[in-house]
Amino acid sequence: MGGDNAPDSVIAGVKSAEQKYSDVRFLIFGDEGKVRPFIDKYRLDSERYEFIHTPDYVASDEKPSAAVRSGRNSSLWLAIDSVKKGKAAAVVSSGNTGALMAFSKLILGTMPGIHRPAIVTILPTRKGECVVLDLGANAECSARNLVEFAVMGEAYCRAVLKREHPTIGLLNIGSEEIKGRDEIRQAAQILRDSPLSNEFKGFVESDDIALGAVDVFVTDGFTGNIALKAIEGTARLMVGLLKDVAAGCLLAKLGFLLALPALRRLKKKMDPGRYNGAMLVGLKGISIKSHGGADAFGFANAINVAVDTVRNDLVGNIAKQLTSIQFLDEEKEK
Amino acid sequence: MGGDNAPDSVIAGVKSAEQKYSDVRFLIFGDEGKVRPFIDKYRLDSERYEFIHTPDYVASDEKPSAAVRSGRNSSLWLAIDSVKKGKAAAVVSSGNTGALMAFSKLILGTMPGIHRPAIVTILPTRKGECVVLDLGANAECSARNLVEFAVMGEAYCRAVLKREHPTIGLLNIGSEEIKGRDEIRQAAQILRDSPLSNEFKGFVESDDIALGAVDVFVTDGFTGNIALKAIEGTARLMVGLLKDVAAGCLLAKLGFLLALPALRRLKKKMDPGRYNGAMLVGLKGISIKSHGGADAFGFANAINVAVDTVRNDLVGNIAKQLTSIQFLDEEKEK
């Protein structure tokens, strides 16, 4: 059991999910001496969880390659293994991201037809919410990888955001001179000729994310990570500058005080915890990354993502859609 | 003379620069019938400008390739040509970006030692301001291109932001699993062994832009464009959500009203006009792109950039720095 606020926020999040979903059971992997006090504190229903004592763990700064060699008795490994063995329907972890990805790939394996798993998340927009992937699993991607991401993102959007016909856009730059990279143009061609042709809206730019111009933004992991962190950094900059404004002037301070209830609602809308729970899609099993700094509300949202994707049979859904797409390079790759 | 608010905002910007710089003269290229009324309106000092009547122009939606074929008598072409001929020290345009880039490359030519020009701009940070390049001139870049951008960005930062020893970072993603793309790692190696080794601070992530973690952020044009537009989109989203908050609640409205003078100072700090004037660096001459939607304040800032880069001999400075860097692939390229 990892994360900056574990085990407190994790167990508090489990309690919240226990109350929300009457038919969900929890397997909790961690060091009993550290976790048990919080199970008692939050009074988890003893009928609804099983505790598996795992003294070994993967440190948050451990390199994935080292963790793969020495972490086979860790709580993370055993939790993912419980999905492989059919004891759990999904794993949710706030621990080491690299190790979660490496272990999940190794234990669960990649879905047939998917060459590379991706990291997918939900972001706030002017209209509501959108889905973005990949956020950093794959620095460089082929056209085929991007099309697979589009299929996975579309299924994820239906499962988690409950949209019936999500629209899809390929992230690109809008310069007149350069129409983006070859693989993006090729991916667009494949999507235009695919069963997703109605959902595919062509190229979008990164300022379209804030506008919610489409439901699913597809890009390689390098670009997705750059966009995500630019968005996070700018949001924090704006909040910081607003606080400076309030601190520097009595009138402004009074003004913000009056606006506080409304500002709190805004903060709630932009709360990263609300969008917590990035899924590793493309695996033969459901593996969810909760942010290391997530609070109970955030961890409960990561559990929501797990429940939604299990109930909507995300893995089966992706597999079905994939078989109906013709890849240009299929012959070459065989 | 192009741009959404031209010629009004352009001539108003020239007037503002005329008052700021007593030793700067202006060549104004445009349609006399359209521009003259604004020269009269803003009372430009007749000793300080020369008007060149150019009825031909490049439309804002014209493709650069078409403009190159048919635009040789346009105001844009003739303005750039005046730099080539030594009649002007720099060109500033609010017109068609693609055409400005294509014409500038064609007329001015690329500096010796520079393989690809880049687009550079200034962005606001928590600490003040930083320099970012490339913003979209080159979708894909080699290690050598990135090193050239670092040299150009460093010189630009000294000239425009007046920093004596600007720090440099290469934009990358921080995942443990993937240490970014090959060309970025190679560029880092070259910079570590170069005369810029003290200034070079290694890899930075896109949330470091808002923090102002370094003075100069170096990246390829695709990634730079993605980061820039993600930043712009998020800033607009936050402002929009704040306005919603104010509109939806009387108390909040009153609060924002009280905070208005302070919010106006904040708006001024974040004003895109303040950061207007993206330079096309790497050319044998100074060519500045003003935003199409720039107002008089913005256009005057683009002129400031032109004056600063001319006075600091940016072109000579870049050439000097470049000759002292050893490129790993120099032999291969010969």
Image (spheres, coloured by chain):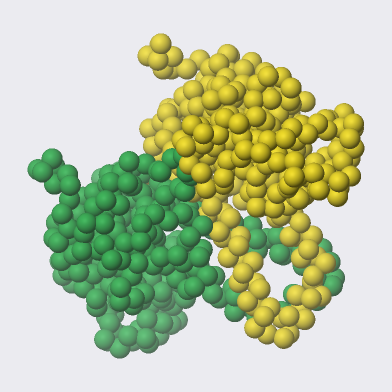
Chain colours: A green, B yellow
Quadrant of the rendered structure where residue A112 is? bottom left
Residue at 70%, 60% (x, y): give it.
Answer: A241
Residue A264 drawn at (x, y percent): 62, 77
Is B194 drawn above or below residue B300 in the view shown? Answer: above
Is A275 drawn above or below residue A99 in the view shown? Answer: below
Residue B166 drawn at (x, y percent): 67, 32
Q: Is residue B22 left or right of residue B272?
A: right
Is residue A289 among the parts visible in the rendering?
no
Residue at 64%, 25% (x, y): give it.
Answer: B81
Q: Look at the image and tell me in which quarter the C terminus of chain B lies.
A: top left
Residue B146 drawn at (x, y percent): 49, 30
Q: Is residue A324 left or right of residue B10?
A: left
Residue A114 drawn at (x, y percent): 20, 54
The number of callouts visible is 0
| In the foreground, B91 or A35 | B91
Residue at 55%, 59% (x, y): give it.
Answer: B233
Is residue A225 among the parts visible in the rendering?
yes
Q: Look at the image and tell me in which quarter the N terminus of chain B lies.
A: top right
Residue at 87%, 32% (x, y): give it.
Answer: B48
| In the foreground, A90 or B257 | B257
Is A303 drawn above or below residue B64 in the view shown? Answer: below
